[in-house]
Amino acid sequence: MNTDFNIEEIKRCSSQYILALNDTLNVINGKWKLPIIGTLLYGKKRFKELQRDITKITPRMLSKELKDLENNGIVKRTVYDSTPVMVEYELTESGKTFNNVLDTMVQWGVEHRNKVISN
């Protein structure tokens, strides 16, 4: 598989552009994945810490979303051999690069909210 890409080439072809967007959306789809990634940008967290930081997420949904993110190479799960067993979640290198996307989304959200409120 060719891993070299040029964003300008992708932008010139609508089908490649849509394919790349769909690849991204397949990883981050759903209500809870972005808040999980955003929380893990601040460092390793245990399950209960994630649940506390992300209000209104159920344990079942958090578990499902963490598994999806782990399967997509965004989150790393580490189980420590201790009593009781300790499990920590952290972003992979690929997951950490998502910081730029989230920063752009947050900036857009604040600007958009300010425009809507001022109208």
Image: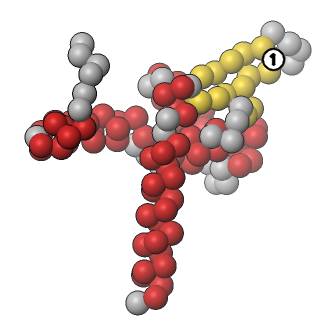
Question: Relative to 7, is 78 above or below?
Answer: above
- Name the quadrant containing residue 87: top right
Picture quadrant where residue 61 is located: top right
Q: Quadrant of the C terminus?
A: bottom left
In this picture, residue 13 sits left or right of residue 33: left
* Residue 35 image position (x, y, % from top left): 57, 48
Residue visible at 51% across and 52% down in the picture: 103
| Label 1, residues with CA under 10 Å away: few <14, some 14-19, many ≥20 | few
Q: Element at badge 1? A: loop
Residue 73 percent across, percent down from the top left: 48, 23
Please name the amino acid that badge 1 sits on.
Answer: Val
Left or right of residue 14, residue 48 in this image? right
Q: Residue furthest bottom?
A: 119
Q: Which residue carries the number 1 mark?
A: 85
At x 74%, y 47%, the residue is 52
- Furthest residue toward right: 83
Looking at the image, which residue is at 10% across and 40% down?
A: 13
Residue 57, how many percent across, how many down? 62, 48
Examine the rendered structure and indicate whether residue 25 appears above or below residue 80: below
Residue 48 pos. (x, y %)? 76, 38
Judge by depth and name the residue closer to the eye, 103 or 85: 103
Q: Nearer the viewer, residue 95 or 66?
A: 95
